Image: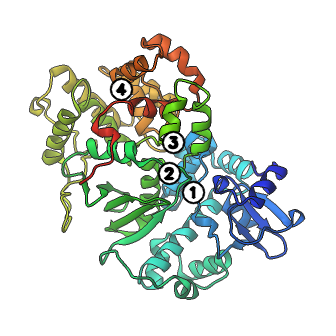
Amino acid sequence: MHTDTERCVRAVQSKDARFDGWFYTAVLTTRIYCRPSCPVVPPKPENMRFYPSAAAAQQAGFRACKRCRPDASPGSPQWDERADLVARAMRLIADGIVDREGVPGLAARLGYSTRQIERQLLAELGAGPLALARAQRAQTARLLVETTALPMAEVAFAAGFASIRTFNETVREVFALSPTELRHRARPGPRTAAPGTLALRLPFRQPLNPDNLFGHLAATAVPGVEEWRDGAYRRTLRLPYGHGIVALTPRPDHIDCRLSLTDLRDLAGAIARCRRMLDLDADPEAVDGLLREDPRLAPLVDKAPGRRVPRTVDADEFALRAVLGQQVSTAAARTHAGRLVRAHGERVDDPGGGLSHLFPSPAALAGLDPESLAMPRTRRATLTGVIAALGSGALQLGVGSDRDEARAQLATLPGIGPWTVECIAMRGLGDPDAFTPTDLGLRRAAAGLGLPATPAALVRHAALWRPWRAYAVQYLWATDDHPINHLPTN
């Protein structure tokens, strides 16, 4: 979008928050860059320059605006919507791959050379993988500087900087303030987070309907791994350097996030996973606008706009849970998963809460005795087959996975049918166009609205909803009075 100067100027002059994260506005006279909705008086159009990423603006010599804090805007919805190389690379960078494994590690996961990765990212985003990772490190550093009392040396290494000198230089260059000045500028309001807990605000594009989003997560919560407590969805997180516990509470203009981590180097990755789980980078105006074009769906969208797709923090975990949930009720699926967690999950401490375990990894389940599972023999074989495929690498479901390849890999596994493949694609891989035409609840809702009820006919009609069929599923499911569609009240 940043190449459409006229459209960008209109968005800046109208302070349209819908475009936050789509592009960044740099001002030649002040040498700062802003989000489109910046509250200051818009600059003259001839003084504006537009960039596709904060990293590109920083590389061009602009510093972040202190008023609108463009580094804290919602991410571009393209990286969830698209499935090409650039989108996959951006999801991996957000997850911290470049900081942990370098650009060669990023390229290896994507199956391309480092030169190809750098060339494509530079062509589309105006910055290479190192610059994009550097911009993310700067944002993480700002969060730690402003929300914790950690010594600056600890902040530097937790944010992923190789040295304190690099940390100081980057913060000064990006924010035009030293780390100490940045901390002094932070609002000193009362700290409501418990000691050792980071209090963050996760932004999103309006509107956001929390009912099906948090209702789904709470209704399907695995005992010991997830819970709804005091108005917040809480769960344990398995992270590259350690583990964590997160509490997420819906607010009118943001998601309140409380994070407790065993290793602060996991902060950026934990935030990225929480945003992905809650689908916070979605563009509800684009999604709802297209779905409203179908007169059958329009009343559902108008009644409760802004529905998101409840996703997951770990695609491998969700794949196993999808198998456990085949042909059983939500309650039965929770029971099966809870037993697996108690028998094979790693224990964690949660003072004052009810969380007790991390969901077991495929490696921890490698020696699972199928006879210990209280389920039909065929589903036991399916579960152990998925565990083996994930453990061997034959099945790749990470954030940088190719969605079409992942679907093909899933379809080759015994006991994995189209419903399971599409559920994993929707919630595990984050495909906004995943569709489950054989789902009983979906077919019942479709029939009630006068839509085709047979899978083949429903697929043909759903072509009108592409590329947002996963969101159409949420609106159709919401016609049923099921706990997944209601925000918990206790």
Q: Quadrant of residue 237?
A: bottom left
What distance separates the C-alpha of mark 1 from that of mark 4?
30 Å
**Three-letter amino acid code of the residue under disc 2:** Leu
Q: Tell me the residue that label 3 is attached to.
A: 305
**Three-letter amino acid code of the residue under disc 3:** Pro
Residue shown at 81% from the left, 48% from the top: 4
Kindly state the secondary structure of the residue where label 3 is placed: loop
Category of crowding for the residue at label 3, using alpha-carbon neighbours closer than 10 angstroms: few (below 14), some (14–19), many (at least 20):
many
What distance separates the C-alpha of mark 3 from that of mark 2?
14 Å
Q: Tell me the residue that label 4 is attached to.
A: 420
Q: Are marks 1 and 4 in contact (CB under 8 Å)?
A: no
Residue 331 x/y as whole percent = 19, 36
Q: Please state which of the two labelled residues, at mark 3 or mark 1, is closer to the viewer.
A: 3
Q: Tell me the residue that label 1 is attached to.
A: 74
Q: Please state which of the two labelled residues, at mark 4 or mark 3, is closer to the viewer.
A: 3
Residue 309 x/y as whole percent = 45, 40
Q: Tell me the residue that label 2 is attached to.
A: 280
**Which quadrant is home to the C terminus?**
bottom left
Q: Are marks 1 and 2 in contact (CB under 8 Å)?
A: yes
User: Where 279 falls versus 23 (above or below)?
Assistant: above
Whether residue 71 is visible, yes or no, is yes
